[in-house]
Image (cartoon, rainbow, N blue to C red):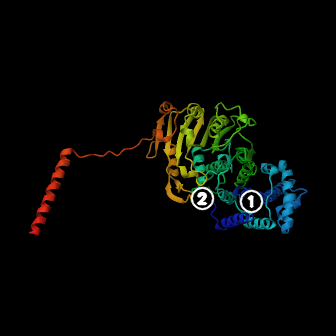
Amino acid sequence: MLTNPELKSKIDSLWDKFWSGGISNPLTAIEQMSYLIFLKRLEDMDNARAAAAKRRNETYRSVFHGNKECKWSHWSQLPGDQMLKHVRDKVFDFLREVGGETSTFTQHMEDAVFVIPKASLLQEAVKIIDDMHISEQNVDVQGDLYEYLLSQLTTSGKNGQFRTPRHIIRMITKLVDPKIGQRICDPACGTGGFLVAAYEQILEENTTPDLIERDEDGKAHHLIGDKIADKKLMQFLKSRALTGYDFDSTMVRIGAMNLMLHGIDNPRCVYTDTMSKAFTEKSEYDVILANPPFKGSIDKSDINERFTTSTTKTELLFIELIYGLLKNGGRAGVIVPDGVLFGTSNAHLAIRKIIVDQCGLEGVISMPSGVFKPYAGVSTAVLIFQKGGTTDKVWFYDMEADGFSLDDKRQRIEANDIPDIIKQWEKKKASKKSFLVPVKDIRSNKYDLSISRYKEIVHTEIEYETPDVIMNKILELEKGIERDMEEIRGMMK
C-alpha cells in the first residue's frame, strides 16, 4: 500500500492530466504512463549496470550506445512540440529495435503505440514522473507506486477479465505457500498480481523477521531475502522462477512493468493464448496461482488438443490447463465462479472429477459476492489442490467478510475472515465458519463442491409449554381481568 501522501497526490495529478488531456480509457492511460515510467527506469538501470561494471573493471556497452538522444535525461529537456515528435518518432523506434538486447520487457515494446496527443500533456507527465524521483525510491515504494496506479482500473475488461483484489491474492498465496527454488506460473496473469505476491511471499519467508514492517493491510515491507545465502537461488528467483502468460498484449506489458518495479529486472511475461493449439508447455510448474477469465469466448477450432473436456467455457478449460501444467505433487490456488462448483453439465462434472479424483483437493473457500465489486458481483470460491495427491476430507470455509464493504465503494471495515482462514489453514479443523467433508460424501453428491450442499443449518429449538400450563395461565389471566372489572364497578357506585 502506498503510504506516502505526496506520491499519491502526484499519481492522482498524473491521472487527472491524462483524463483532461483526452485519454479517458483507464487501461490506455495506465499503458501510456507505464511506457513513460519504463523509459525513466531504462536509463536508471543502464546507469546502475555501467557503475557496477566499472567497479569490477569490466567493459560495459550501454543500451543507448549510438542512441544517447533516446535517454530520458536528454529528451525530457526538449521544448514541448519537439519532445512529442522526438518521443513518437525516435524514442519508440529505438525501444522496438533494442528489444532483443536488454530485458524481456523491451521485447513487449515491439508493438507498443505511443498515443499521447498533446505536447503539453507529455510535458506535464514528464515533470510529474521526474518529481516522483522513481530512481531514488526503494523497491517497496516503486512497487506500491505502480500498484496504486493499477488500483485505478475499476472497469472490467473483455472476456471476463478484471483485476483481482491484492488482499485476496495475498491470502491465496499464503495458503499455497510457494518456496524458494520452485517454478511458479499464472496462465492468465493480467497485471501480474499473483506473481508479485509469490515473489514477496518467498522473500518474506527468507527475510529476518525483525527487518519486516507491515502496513495497515498487513502487507510486509523491507523484504530483502537476507536468509537466501545461495546466490544462484536468488538469481533463479529474480529471473526464471516466475512465469506469466496472457493473450492481451497490453496486460502483458503492464504485468511486466509491475514485476520490474517490484525488483525483477527480467520478468517472464509471455504474450500467448494458453487455450490455443500454439501453446505446448506441459508439467513445468511446482505452483500455479490464478484467477482465470470467467466468461471468456474461445474459438472452438483453435482449442488445444490437450483438453479432454468437451466445452468452450474458459473457466472449466483453465482448470484442466492448470492440472496439465503442474508437475506431479505441484499445488494450485485458483479462483473460480460458483457455477464451477455445482454445474450439472458433463463438462462441469468431468472437471470436478479431475480435482477430486486425480488431485488432493485440500480446501474450498467460499467468498462473498461483493469481493470483486465494482468490477462484478459474481459469487466465487477458491480451490486449493495438489496434483497427484489423494483427497480424503475437504476443508470448507464460509468467508463472510474480507475487511471491506461488499458494495461498489469497498470501504475498509472491521469484519475480516482472512486472518482466521490463514490461521486455521494448517490444521484445517472444524470451527464456527469451517467444516470437513469426507470425499465419499462429495462423490455421492455428484462431486458437488458448493458449500451450501454440506453446510449444516442450525435450527434453534423452541420449547413450547404443555397445554395444562397454558390453560392455567389463561384462567389466571381471566381471574385477574374479572378482579379489575369488579374494582371499576365499585368505583362507579
Query: In what quadrant of the picture does the N terminus appear?
Result: bottom right
Amino acid type, callout 1 = Met
Question: What's the residue at 28%, 46% (across, down)?
Answer: 463
Residue position marked by numbered label 2 in the rendering: 213
Quadrant of res 324: top right
Count neighbours of disc 1 (C-alpha within 10 A) and say few if under 14, some if 14 to 19, many if 20 or more: many
Secondary structure state at the residue bearing disc 2: strand
**Is residue 427 shown to the viewer in this render?**
no
Observer-nearest of 233 and 284: 284
Q: Give the tally of numbered discs.
A: 2
Question: What's the residue at 51%, 32% (across, down)?
Answer: 446
Q: Position of residue 377 (x, y in %)?
A: 57, 50
C-beta proximity under 8 Å, tags 2 and 1 = no
Q: Relative to 413, does residue 383 appear above or below in the rendering? A: above
**Is residue 138 shown to the viewer in this render?**
yes
In this rendering, position of residue 447 left or right of residue 228: left
Q: Position of residue 337 (x, y in %)?
A: 58, 43
Q: Nearer the viewer, mark 2 or mark 1?
A: 1
Secondary structure state at the residue bearing disc 1: helix
Name which of mark 2 and mark 1 comes first in the sequence: 1
Observer-nearest of 93 and 238: 93
Count neighbours of disc 2 (C-alpha within 10 A) and say few if under 14, some if 14 to 19, many if 20 or more: few
Observer-nearest of 137 and 190: 190
Residue position marked by numbered label 1 in the rendering: 33
Q: Position of residue 140 (x, y in %)?
A: 67, 58
Q: CA distance from mark 2 to mark 1?
A: 29 Å
Furthest residue to the front?
493
Q: Position of residue 366 (x, y in %)?
A: 52, 45
Q: Which mark is residue 250?
A: none
Query: In what quadrant of the picture does the C terminus appear?
Result: bottom left
Amino acid type, callout 2 = Glu
